[in-house]
Structure formats: C-alpha cells, structure tokens
Amino acid sequence: MKIILYLIFLISFLQSNQFRPGLSVWFSANDLSLAGGGRLLFNPNARNVNLNVISKSKLFSTSFIFYPAGIQAQSASMLLIKNDKAIITSVNHISYGTFSGYDENAVKTENYTSSDTWLSFGYNEVSKILPLKYGVSNQLYISKLENITSTSIYSSFGLVWTNKKYKLDIGCIANDILLFHDRPTDNINSMYFNIGVCKDLIHLPLKLSIDCKLNTIMTPVDYYISGSFNISENILLNLGTSTRKFSQNTEQSLSQTIFGSSGFGVFFKNKELVIGYGLYFYGTGGFSSGLDMNISF
C-alpha cells in the first residue's frame, strides 16, 4: 500500500512528451455510452486499470466497436475472483483498415494495413485494514504500420477510497506510465492522471460519476460527468458527456455543440448474461457504436 502512495507522489513530478493517439482508443460500449468517463464504475473491458471490477463471480467479457471510416476495435477479457482479489487478463485490438501503397515515384505497390494490439494483465485487491481498493494493470502494446512494428510496455495503477455510509467512492488513477519502448529516440510518454468521484444517489436509481483528466503537472485537461440508471432489475441505462465537446466543436450547429462528445447506452441483463449497446457522438458530427457481452460463471 505504501509503495503505491509513494509512486503516485513520485510520478506527479514527471513531464509527459509526445502523445500517442492509439492510447485514447475505447474498447467497449460501456466506454462509448459514458463518453469516456465513469472510471470508477464497473467496466471489465477497460484498457487501463479498473478499480471496481471485484464481483461475486467469474466473468468473461467481449466487445466490438465500430468507428467512422471503417475502423474497428475488438476486445476480450477474463475476470477471476478469489477472496476479495481480482485477476484480469485481456486482449484489445484495433484495425485502422487497409491502405493503397505507393513508392517515392507515386507508383502503386502492394496494399498494407495498420493496427494496434494490447495484451494486458491486471490485479485488484480490497484492503483488509482500510476502506480502500487498489490495483495495477500492465500492458504490452504492439503498434503496426505496413512492415514496421513498434513495441512498448505501459503500466497503470490507482486506488479508491469507499465510504459505505454515504455510498461514495473517491479515486485516483495514474494511466499509461511508459516502462519500455523499443525505439528510445521517439521520446514518447503519454502518462496522465484521472481523479474521480462516484456516488449512489438516495432518491434516484442513479450512480453518478464525475471525473477529471489531468496532465503530469496536475493541470486539468477535460472533465466528464456520467451516470448509470437502474431502469428496472434487468435494464440499465448509461449517459455521459464531457468538456471535449468544446475542443471537438467546429461551430457547425448548435445541436452538435450541445450533444457533441456525449454518449448513450442500454444494457439488458438475463440471469448470467448481460448484452449492451452504446453510442458516442462527436462534436464534429458522426458517431461510433459498440456492442458488449458479459457472461458470469
């Protein structure tokens, strides 16, 4: 526990450099429907560490995401539970499509593809002494463009404090800490922090989450507000929005300004099976959609 607190204090002084867009990809309908927020809500297909995945049963989860321009993402994860401890293994893959190849003389060559793949292993635990959950996720990241392959290792970790009396969670997560990169001259480090608050409302069947994304000098980058409504015992409704609507906005219309960078999703539960559909609307117009399936056993 002391080691995690020490690491959070230490890396808060680090400076991030070049940003890797592939690290911002979402791999689940849950992510889309919450507009990238809800980091303290249950999400077994989260690429980074998720601190609220400890449940009463084992879980297999898979997702399919359809981005504009024919870009597709898939993920599969396995969650194993024992004595308030959770082990999560997952594979996340995104294909950017097939492209026409040309040489330096503009002569057509063979087509080529581009893709990113993550192999992740995570561990979460509930403290037996304090009302805390903490966890870590290590990820092997393989990025491929034509016949060029780049390999990196990232780590994410965090902790969440729980107040059962007020049904309140407060958490801090350090994401995408670069441990290894096979091209050291690239000077890549995309680490950022996430601070979140999550609360079960008393008079509404709603779990409300507010998140703030910060860079390594602790300057806020974006804010997210999202929630999960229990419409009934078998139906869950997700909603989310963020301040990314302002950076994405191109002043095309008022509706795009209001609804841009927002998400919506519906999840249906039938015994051990949960199926969900999520949408994310861009401030520039257009949307991404996705399907989730969770099976408890």
Image: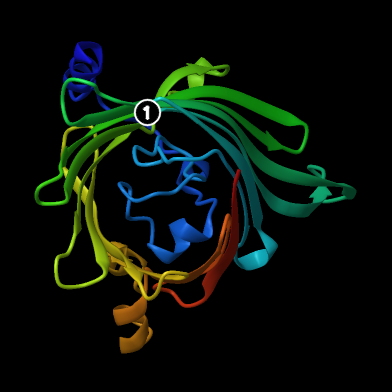
Residue nearest the observer in this picture, 229 or 142: 229
- The type of residue carrying mark 1 is Asp
Residue that lies at the very extreme toward the left in this rendered image: 165
Residue nearest the observer in this picture, 277 or 271: 271
Quadrant assignment, res 149: top right
Q: Position of residue 250 (x, y in %)?
A: 36, 75
Q: Position of residue 52 (x, y in %)?
A: 35, 41
Compared with 2, 89 (above or below) is: below
| Secondary structure of the residue carrying numbered label 1 | loop
Question: What residue lies at 58% left-to-right and 54% top-to-bottom?
Answer: 272
Q: Quadrant of the N terminus?
A: top left
Residue nearest the observer in this picture, 113 or 56: 56
Horizontal placement of 221 versus 273: left or right?
left
Q: Position of residue 79 (x, y in %)?
A: 54, 36
* CA neighbours of label 1 inside 10 A, class few (<14), some (14 to 19), many (20+): some
Residue that lies at the very extreme toward the bottom in this rendered image: 254
Compared with 272, 124 (above or below) is: above
Q: Position of residue 228 (x, y in %)?
A: 33, 65
Residue holding disc 1: 84
Question: What residue lies at 56% left-to-right and 68% top-to-bottom?
Answer: 289
Horizontal placement of 144 versus 152: left or right?
right
Horizontal placement of 164 versus 156: left or right?
left
Total numbered badges shown on the rendered structure: 1
Question: What residue lies at 52% left-to-right and 43% top-to-bottom?
Answer: 22
Question: What residue lies at 73% left-to-right and 54% top-to-bottom?
Answer: 97
Quadrant assignment, res 290: bottom right
Quadrant assignment, res 164: top left
Residue 280 seen in the figure? no
Q: Quadrant of the C terminus?
A: top right
